Amino acid sequence: MLVTVIIGNYNYGRFIDRAIENVLDQTYRNVELIVVDDGSTDNSREVIDRYDGKLLKIYKENGGHAAAINVGFERSQGDVICLLDSDDYYAPIKLERTVALYQEFPESAVCIPCSR
């Protein structure tokens, strides 16, 4: 099962590398990572460019967070879609638990695993 993680970013160059590394270090490995930069004016795009080949990067004009997420969603290929803010990170097993929960309840539209 392919999991797509969409990170929307705007001027969070100081945080975005941690969010990207966090997704790349998940215990669940079948992951498509999409980073949508929403017209950042800081060093965000330089940081994102360091991950060429490891993620799909989308650079767009500023249109707001929801618009950035929508662009990522349109490009996603995953069976399960997860959102991550560019200044945040997941527990290392978050995607693994999300997939397990989805497999247990395949009719679900939203799955939110607890951290325990």
Image (cartoon, rainbow, N blue to C red):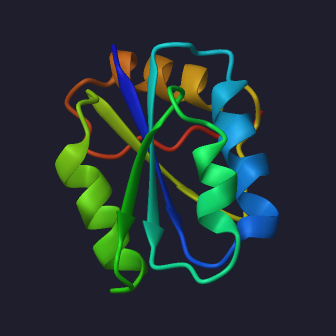
Task: Tell me residue 67's x, y (percent).
Answer: 29, 76
Q: Is residue 113 above or below residue 88?
A: above
Left or right of 61 on screen, residue 88: right
Left or right of 74 on screen, residue 11: right
Q: Is residue 13 above or below residue 89?
A: below
Q: Nearer the viewer, residue 22 or 17?
A: 17
Residue drawn at 64 percent across, 35 percent down: 23
Task: Tell me residue 14's x, y (percent).
Answer: 81, 67
Q: Quadrant of residue 65?
A: bottom left
Left or right of 85 on screen, residue 66: left
Residue drawn at 26 percent across, 52 percent down: 73
Task: Tell me residue 27's x, y (percent).
Answer: 68, 15
Q: Is residue 75 above or below residue 42?
A: above
Task: Tell me residue 103's x, y (percent).
Answer: 35, 16
Viewport quadrant of the N terminus: top left
Residue drawn at 58 percent across, 15 percent down: 28
Q: How many marks?
A: 0
